[in-house]
Amino acid sequence: MKVILMRGLPGSCKSTKGRKLSQEYDAVICSADFFFEELGEFDAAKLSQAHNFCKNAFINALGSNKNVIVDNTNTTYSEMEFYIEYAKEKHEIYLVYSDSDWRNDINECYRKTIHNVPLETIKKMAARFESHEVIINKAKTNIKNEADLKMEIK
């Protein structure tokens, strides 16, 4: 089974790509955003609760024997560590990025985000964004990229 970790700034079209991949790979999507959708509004004070909600959904989804997509910003290893550590023994892990032309354009991501994330917050997220190589080194496990995912036969 595959665990696909979506990565990118708010407004970079991670969720759009995640929905496409979920159809392509028959995957369950887990996202902290779902917590806020149920709540009816974004509340930064409840981010910790939202991520715990996502982690619980992830554990349940892995139990369903389906591929799983984690659709969060995942800017650093520490933000992905739970998912990587939980999945690394039995699942193939992939890091996948948005296809949008503006995914690295902070101002355009700010303009397009539907979650009202402040521009300063997006700038901080961009500044701390760790590369694929850094994530692999910190994880000390085999993490694949999107090219690997596309090469595999479903």
Image (cartoon, rainbow, N blue to C red):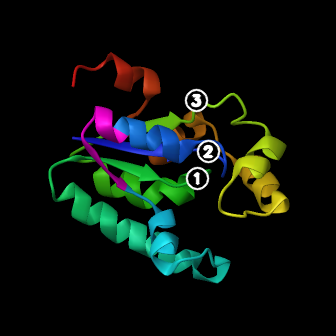
Q: Which quarter shows the C terminus?
A: top left
Q: Residues within 10 Å of mark 3 (few under 14, many from 20)?
A: few
Query: Which residue is depicted at the point 59% across and 76% down?
Result: 41
Q: Tell me the quarter of the picture where residue 24 sits.
A: top left
Per the image, the residue denoted by label 2 is 8
Question: Which element type, helix, strand or loop, lies under badge 3?
Answer: loop
* 2 or 3: tag closer to the N-terminus: 2
- Is residue 64 left or right of 138 when viewed as pictured? left
Per the image, the residue denoted by label 1 is 73
Q: Is residue 146 magenta?
A: no
Label drawn at residue 99: 3
User: Do the residues under discs 2 and 3 have CB atoms within 8 angstroms?
Assistant: no
User: Where are the magenta residues, as a range?
Assistant: 22-29
Percent position (x, y) of residue 38?
45, 75
Label drawn at residue 43: none
Question: Which element type, helix, strand or loop, lies under badge 1?
Answer: loop
Q: Amino acid at mark 1?
A: Thr
